Amino acid sequence: MLLFYDDCCVNSKRADLMGGIAMTKGRKGKKVVWTRLFVFVFFIYALFVIANQQYSIHKLNKVKAEVQKNVDASKMENERLKNLLKNAKDEKNLERMAREQLGLIKPGETVYVDQSSSDVYLHEGGN
């Protein structure tokens, strides 16, 4: 009987070992499934984040292009105004602008307007 008891104990130990191994394989299998699921979900999340960032970058590049366009236009306008100011300080240009834009004349000049065109002719008259 002792032999039977040993066989029984050996068999039960084998069963425990086999069950333990079976349970370990089951746990490992579940761990692998959860790990794969986690990696898949993380991969999908990473793709979503990258796509969202690319869309944001695209929108910001559009805004940057518009702002750069406005800056360039402002620089051109600034340059034009600087040239206008520079020309306004010159005596000849100041006189020309007074005649053309304000319609001023020198004393003793007579203004002739050609009715067939919009040209204005000045004639210096003598006293």
Image (tube, rainbow, N blue to C red):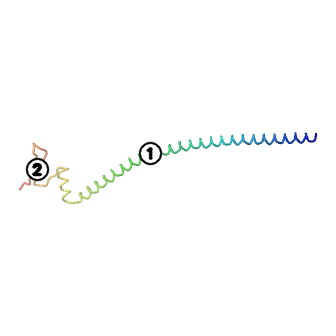
Q: In screen coordinates, is 33 left or right of 70?
A: right
Q: In screen coordinates, is 45 left or right of 10?
A: left
Residue under the point 26% across and 57% down: 83
Does dot 2 land on a helix, a strand or a loop?
strand
Disc 1 crowd rating (10 Å Cα; few below 14, some 14-19, many 20+) is few
Q: In the rendered view of the protein, which quadrant contains the C terminus? A: bottom left
Expressed as whole percent of the image width and height from the top left, the position of residue 62 reads 41, 46
Q: Of callouts 1 and 2, which one flags the residue occurring earlier in the amino acid sequence? A: 1
- The residue most toward the right is 1
Residue under the point 87% across and 41% down: 9
Q: CA distance from mark 1 to mark 2?
A: 58 Å
Give the numbered dot on residue 121: 2
Give the numbered dot on residue 58: 1
Please tell me which residue lies in front, 73 or 93: 73
Asked if marks 1 and 2 touch (Cβ < 8 Å), the reply is no
Q: Quadrant of residue 117?
A: top left
The disc labelled 2 sits on which kind of residue? Answer: Tyr
Does dot 1 land on a helix, a strand or a loop?
helix
- The residue most toward the bottom is 90
Residue under the point 12% across and 55% down: 107
Q: Quadrant of residue 33?
A: top right
Expressed as whole percent of the image width and height from the top left, the position of residue 126 reads 6, 56
The disc labelled 1 sits on which kind of residue? Answer: His
Count of number-bearing discs: 2
Please tell me which residue lies in front, 21 or 38: 21
Give the numbered dot on residue 96: none
Disc 2 crowd rating (10 Å Cα; few below 14, some 14-19, many 20+) is few
Mark 1 vs mark 2, foreground winner is 1
